[in-house]
Amino acid sequence: MPTRTTKKTGTAEAADAAPAAGGPARPSYFPQLAAERPDIALCRASTAVARAAEAHAGAQGLGVGQHLVLKMLAAVGPCSQQSLSEELRIDRSVMVGLCDDLEQGGLVRRERNPRDRRSYAVTVTESGRAVLADAETGVAGYLDTVFLPLDQDERRQLAGLLGKLLAGPGA
């Protein structure tokens, strides 16, 4: 494909990104790239799903991180911020902000960890449980929308494959 240098930036860019009117439609390159580079395809899919998740969570009144923190606390009980950070794979500095926001909203409370007085245990409150329950009601519909191109068997297969990737080296 020919390139041209723009006057404004001096950078090269692909010329004629769209086919000329009446010209033959060019096949999409991305399917070929995705087949050659599954890492790139996974990054693009992850970005699309993350954007959809944030939009859905925002409509429920929580960010994705806040939702995950409440979900984990409701499932496993009080945890340190460090445990939450490690298990949910959320950067420590981001976790501090998430817990601050949840605490200010009355959805969690921090108390000295009885097992380690140097740390705090984060506990979900009854208000937090109620907000989580409301947020959880829309998850199944959201997942059906986002993963519409996949049937149930493909969704299970995808979940299994992603689990393997996340359990492997470098995860």
Image (cartoon, grey):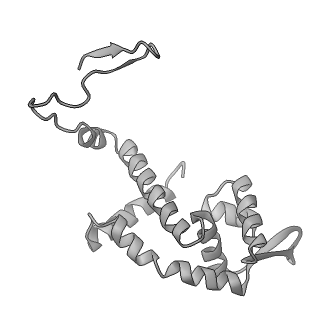
Q: Give the image quarter of residue 87.
A: bottom right
Q: Residue at x 74, y 53 (%)?
A: 93
Rendered view: 69 above or below 37: below
Q: Residue at x 33, y 65 (%)?
A: 147
Q: Give the image quarter of residue 73.
A: bottom right
Q: How many marks?
A: 0
Relative placement, left or right, of 36 versus 142 is left
Rendered view: 32 above or below 71: above
Relative placement, left or right, of 38 versus 2 is right
Q: Residue at x 45, y 16 (%)?
A: 8
Quadrant in which the N terminus is drawn: top left
> Which x, y percent locates residue 70?
64, 75
> Which x, y percent locates residue 68?
59, 69
Relative placement, left or right, of 11 versus 27 is right
Q: Give the image quarter of residue 10.
A: top left
Rendered view: 108 above or below 32: below
> Which x, y percent locates residue 54?
52, 61
Out of 97 and 20, give the one closest to the viewer. Answer: 20
Rendered view: 161 above or below 79: above
Q: Residue at x 21, y 39 (%)?
A: 28
Identify the residue at the far right of this view.
117
> Which x, y percent locates residue 50?
48, 57
Out of 94 and 3, give the one closest to the viewer. Answer: 3
Out of 42 and 106, give the one closest to the viewer. Answer: 106
